Amino acid sequence: MQFTQEHDEIRRTLRAIIDRDINPHVDQWEEDGIFPAHEVFKKLGDAGLLGINKPTGYGGMGLDYSYAMVMAEELGHIHCGSVPMAIGVQTDMATPALARYGSDELRKEFLAPSIAGDYVACLGVSEVGAGSDVASIKTTARKVGGDWVINGGKMWTTNGTQADWMCLLASTGEGPVHKNKSLICLPMKTKGVQVAKQLDKLGMRSSDTAQIFLDEVKVPVRNLIGQEGMGFVYQMQQFQEERLWGAISAVVGMERLIDQTIEYTRERKVFGRPLLDNQVIHFKLAELCTEIELVRSLCYRACEEHLDGADVTMLASMAKLKAGRMVRLVSDGCLQYWGGAGYLWESPTARAFRDSRLASIGGGADEVMLQIISKHMGTLPRLENR
């Protein structure tokens, strides 16, 4: 990757907002179990950071995906996983399909205010019985006159209690499961939308994750994103960027935790010597640092190929798989070297340990990534009626 002055300026602009408006409040937000999404997103929107690779006609910068990847990487400087994840939903998970395929009217209504930071978006894909298996969703949308009438529910919905609208995946027909789904823009204040509860999670404490019920919810037919029946395809495209975002956004946080661990073990004396002087520790940290750099390089390669128009499903899946496993190894390994101090709830290692576990589950579990990679390798068994 060759970075320009414009890439560096995005890093500087975002880092200033993180240092001034986010990190000083993270500990309190984690304790509260929620962060003020509208307030934070508005600051990012005013700086132009919520539409880096979105069309200029709707308030975006119109830059290529490498600039969005730089932003995702820089978000790793935030001292928790919750806020970066929420921002990633806004920029790389709930809005890409709308930006690519939405009508001009729909993009003015939902995309423009999301880029400006006036709207908070959420993604309605996962359900109680359908997480990584997107084809198994049960939420339906049927046409009645000029409306979609939606019934079902969504689970694990990041930003769910604060969102103004949802990019909803629903079954809109009776055909094959990969061809009967559509994406629909759903205003969250619509009658019949019920935020059932905010979920109490192991980690990502300041991210509001909701269970949502949908009972005879009516939205105009014009709220359809792109073509009817193409929702599964559009969502798979969104997953490419979501998984790359998830992989690259983990890199800086891992590096920061290693730096903190080096500092701690250098100061911590055991049997009269700095803990860091033990070869097993400084060798292990060197190995982890090397592995992290490999994740970064894989993400950069995938980004370059994505810019060239290649299908990077396999590379994005590899990056997501490797990053998810690495962040768990790094957080667990560093916590071990902090000892009892690392086990305290408020320590950076404990927070990283809690937050990191989601990386191998959300956005497609490790097993799904392995299945995708195997399919592209040609080793996945071909089963009858699959």
Image (cartoon, rainbow, N blue to C red):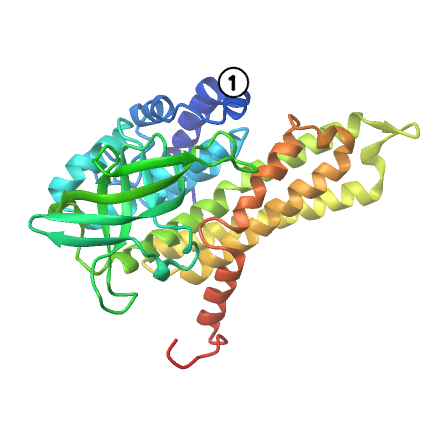
Image x and y of residue 361, in percent: 51, 50
Viewer-nearest residue: 220 or 327: 220
Image x and y of residue 113, in percent: 23, 31
> Image quarter for residue 182?
bottom left
> Which residue shows up at 35% across the image and 27% down it?
41
> Position of 161 compared to 347: left or right?
left
Viewer-nearest residue: 302 or 113: 113
> Which residue shows up at 37% across the image and 79% down it?
385
Q: Residues within 10 Å of mark 1 (few under 14, many from 20)?
A: few
Work out whether 149 lies above or below 178.
above
Work out whether 371 lies above or below 43.
below
Q: Residue furthest left?
A: 145
Q: Residue furthest bottom?
A: 384
What quarter of the picture does the C terminus occupy?
A: bottom left
- Amino acid under disc 1: Pro
Residue 94 in sight from this viewpoint: no
Work out whether 261 lies above or below 104.
above
> Which residue shows up at 67% across the image and 30% down it?
260
Image x and y of residue 80, in percent: 54, 31
Viewer-nearest residue: 107 or 149: 149
Kindly identify which residue carries mark 1.
24
Number of on-image labels: 1
Residue 319 in sight from this viewpoint: yes
Q: Determine whether the residue tagged by mark 1 lies in a helix, strand or loop.
A: helix
> Position of 326 compared to 123: left or right?
right
Image x and y of residue 154, in percent: 35, 46
Q: Residue furthest right?
A: 271
> Which residue shows up at 29% across the image and 53% down it?
139
